[in-house]
Image (cartoon, rainbow, N blue to C red):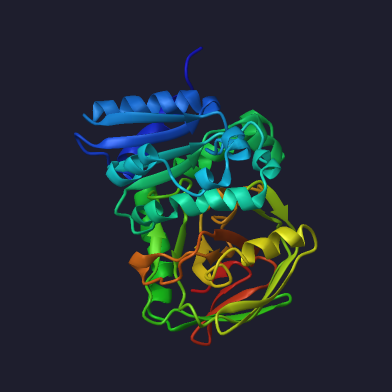
Amino acid sequence: MSRDPRVDDYAELLVGKCVDVQPGWQVLVKGALLARPLLEAVSAAIGRRGAYALQRLSLSGQGTNIDWVLSAPEELLGKASSIEAHDWETADALIVIVAPENTRELSRVPAERLGLVQAAVRPYMERVFTHELPWVGCHFPTQALAQDAGMSLEEFEDFLYGACLLDWDVEHERISRYAELFDRADEVRVVGQDTDLRLSIAGRRMRVDAGQANMPGGEFFCSPVEDSAEGTIAFSEFPAAYLGQEVAGIRLRFEGGRVVEASAESNEEFLLSRLDLDEGSRRLGELGIGCNPGITRHLKNTAFDEKIDGTFHLALGNGFPDLGGTNVSQLHWDIVKDMRNGGTIELDGEIVQESGIWRP
């Protein structure tokens, strides 16, 4: 069968625009078996640029060796192998392709064991957080992703490529205009149903993601001042997904930048376990604003949902050092709030967005 031509366009976007692979680079290409068409196209695109494509295949669609994590002794889980460490330390770029057969496959792995694996690779992730290691994460359409989205596979393919194969130069210019409003401000206030939260962004800058590290792109984000969050927020519109778990109705109250009260309508125990993961997991590492015009509905997939035009998201846990963030954590959990139902975003007391629409 001939390959969907959009797969080759997608591969060129990832290799060229997002990562800008250079001759001689060693590029880690991580993906699952269901992503074979895109893995082939990405590897070919890397080869045409005179670079090495180093494929790292996983039976798990989300990159975790589940059978090993369930079976290995904890002392192994908590320490990265020397070969894996060498990969992280010496690679010139990283492309990760998510293609699950089952989007909840990680739910059978105890959170404690996943936490050990995350802690083992955390020191090597610093190159990712600082963008010293050019990288991009993306999805390849599978039946599982389509089912979660409430679509047929063909519908989801059209949706995914419609959200990713945009004119990212034009999008970067548009999104940058909104990001500049935040760069000139000191305080963000978010008001909505059961929500009134203030954050300081004084001295911090926004990064525009429009065809760079995440695909689909279509957001801008920063690391808010770590001790500044004050107030409450209710993520009542969408459930939050993380590590194969789904948590609905999350409510958080912040004092001095820390979560001091937390509850959820479902799976509250998992929420609390993540908040108690380490010293930094109760503080915020990210404030992000979704701006992708091709994403208008919730898909139970954070990589897409955080880009919904008219939403914003907070990430509990690790911040971005190159954006001034100082919070350190194994956790980085993006949780999305819909602002299209009457919520407002204020900058230094002035409303700049209402019901998901930017004010002129």
Is residue 53 shown to the viewer in this render? yes
Q: Position of residue 139 (x, y in %)?
A: 52, 38
Residue 257 picture quarter: bottom right
Residue 321 picture quarter: bottom left
Q: Position of residue 92 (x, y in %)?
A: 27, 42
Q: Position of residue 165 (x, y in %)?
A: 44, 40
Residue 100 picture quarter: top right
Q: How many marks?
A: 0
In the image as oriented, which residue stretches furthest toward the bottom? 349
Q: Nearer the viewer, residue 65 or 134?
A: 65
Q: Nearer the viewer, residue 320 or 301?
A: 320
Residue occupying image coordinates x 34% and y 59%: 130
Residue occupying image coordinates x 64% and y 37%: 145
Q: Is residue 256 left or right of residue 217?
A: right
Residue occupying image coordinates x 41% and y 71%: 325
Q: Position of residue 280 (x, y in %)?
A: 52, 70
